[in-house]
Image (cartoon, rainbow, N blue to C red):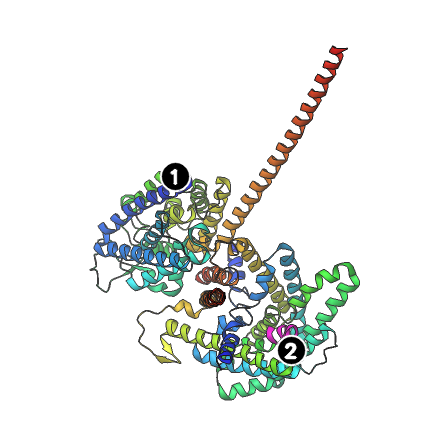
Amino acid sequence: MNKKRTSVFKELLGNNIVLLSLMVISPVIICGDTLRNAAALVYAFSAITFLAVTISSFVPKRLPYTLKVIIYALISSVVYIPVKWAAQEFFPGAVVRIGIYFPLLAVNSLIIFRSESELYRMPKNAMIVRLIFYILGFDAVMLITGFIRELFAYGTINEKIVDINTLISGLSQPFGGFIFLGLFCGFYRWIRILVRNRKNEIRSDADVSGQ
Amino acid sequence: MTKKTRKERLVWLDIMITLLALELMSYFYYGVRSLVLGGVCIVVSLISEIVCLRLMNRTFTADDLTCTSDALIIALMMPAVMDYKIASIACIFAVIAAKNIFGGRRNMIFSPAAAAYVFMLTSWGKKLLLYPEPHVKAGIFDVPDGLVSSTSYVYNTTGKIDLTDFEIFMGNFSGPAGSVSILLLIVAAVMLMLRRDISVGAFIGTIAGTAFPACIMPISNTSPVKYALVTNMVLFAAVYIISDRRIAPQKEYYAFFYGLFIAVFSYIVVLTTGKENAVVIISVLFTPVALGFRNLEKKIALAHEEVFAIKQEAALVESEASDSGDEEISAETEDNGSE
Amino acid sequence: MFLVNDLIALLAANLILTQALGTSTIFIAADSRKNLVGTAFVITVFTFFGSAAAYYADKLLPEKYSDFKLLIYVISIGILYVILLSALYFISRKNFENSRKYIHLSVFNCAVMGTLLTVSERAASDSSFMGLKNYMTAGLEAGIGFITAALILTAAYRKLNSAKVPASFRGFPAMLVYLGIISMAVYSLI
């Protein structure tokens, strides 16, 4: 049970596509300034990516790389259409607020490149699990970013006013997104290094005691 | 203690002395509030620096006190009645985001003070650009009122300055606490240049880059060069930001052009948009130019070293060849002698 | 004098500094001069010709089918992708192996797709912008913006990847903060 929990933890936090691989960062930087926008992007990314990657996994592997990439992009562009219609129902105004970053999610590098280089080489079940963790990783980063930036830039949480004395309006701007994401990335890597060093220490202690 | 380390500490000391003089002048005009603001900036910067160094597994040494001079520069660029929380956040940003993330004082990319100023401008622009009148002293915890636009703003928008030369030199006009004391800044500039604590090339380039366009494209017809130099923090930035030896190119002629380009660009921005204190913003924007110059200097130095090494090798080969030639001649001479 | 203002306007519209489009690609481009030239050139070609394709797509597509715009753009970029690869193969087979990676990297990139969508959005809000010349100029400006941002990053690349930078910030995180501070300076000018 412990092993399963560790492996879930490792998958969720160890291989974050945003903080480690710097994929799909444009929506996080530009649109991750409020929790509402973040929620809309989380829905869009999760739906488009999961459906597009799953459907694209049935594309024959023997096709040339170029053709496969074009087919993946076409599939995700088609998947985007109903996802957008649903977003207009569930998140009214979000599609307009998010602007071009909504359709851009349909051609994100996870669908176009990472799927081809990693996911489609795995067995289907493992691929689905890995994909879900990638999506959850992005969702977590998006929501945390949206929450913190909204809190300190606007003094609200989900548009409800919170008592914050000093607001940093620059956090709501693109440059604020760049700087915040850079700091977040660095913090995440620092935690990873700490955890890895601790594991190595435990392992070396175990070796020594085993001797 | 190495020569370089000793020099770094002395540079810091000289700069701190000049900044403290400006801080005293600010106290004269704005009271104890400006001193407390400076103190808050210094304490917050020190704590942030210590925490950062601990996280990087480094010990705090006397050289790391440069964070205090950066803090005082930030304090002197603000209104004397700035909110302490905003000042603290700006100092934390300067120490962490603009300096220690890139490796601290050993790997400087941005001027921490300039980056912090731009950060404050984008986040609290209205509060940053309203100043108390000189001799209006606010209490330590008072909420300031009766704030006015700076003289630079008035000059940028109307082209008029209604001040005597004495008032300009003594800093008796509204503006950032440290950048208005023109006489003190001139003395500081001369002193720091003579002691090689700041880049002479960058300073002269900045002054030339402001004076020359001001002659050709004046904002006002009355003393355009004088007013161009004393407003918009040009002199202050020329001394403490653009001529900062940690950022400016090392070779003086590169530093001259670096300062010149920044000054020309910022003058044109002031002329066309009326943007206040544009020189600080442009100095941050020109960071890649400074880095480009430094890369060029390194490449030239490496090329010189290579050429020198090749010449040395050639000289060694030549001397070996001549030695072996001498040996042969002396061996021949011996043989002839023996025959 | 107005050159300075034009430069500031160009920076203010820069797709990386103000829209964060193509940020991951630029980190790869700034790695070496060869990568910079290759990636920047290919992205500029894609944005330039892609914008022309976007113009015809916007002109011919009825308003009620605007949701299919992305699909049309993807088809256009896909065709351009194949044409570029074929052209590179037939022009110089020797360079094909080394240079095709730039085309693979640039196609369906945020910088390229983002440019098409931005230009289309601009034309939708300002009808006077609707013209082939304007579209292609905007595409070219986007490519130049990418090159500018790549040069800005290249200047600091060595320092940002130096051993003096703390390990957890070395590389991408430091680059993000660096670009953020430059972007902040651009923002404060507008």
**In the shown orientation, is residue B166 left or right of residue A58?**
left
**In the shown orientation, is residue A57 left or right of residue B300?**
right
- In this view, A65 is above or below B156: below
Label 2 marks a residue whose chain is A
Q: Main secondary structure of the magenta part?
A: helix
**In the shown orientation, is residue A203 left or right of residue B117?**
right
Is disc 2 placed on a helix, strand or loop? loop
Of labels 1 and 2, the one closer to you: 2
**Furthest-front residue in view?**
A211
Label 1 marks a residue whose chain is B
Picture coordinates of residue B318, whole percent (x, y): 67, 27
Q: Amino acid at mark 1?
A: Met
* Residue placed under numbered mark 2 in the picture: A122
The answer to whether residue A153 is visible is yes
**What residue is rendered at 71% in x and 73% in y?**
A65
Neighbour class for label 1 at 10 Å: few (<14), some, many (≥20)?
Answer: some
Discs 1 and 2 share one subunit: no
Is disc 1 placed on a helix, strand or loop? helix
Q: Amino acid at mark 2?
A: Met
Label pair 1/2, CB-CB below 8 angstroms? no
**Tag shown at residue B193:** 1
Range of residues picked out in magenta: A109-118
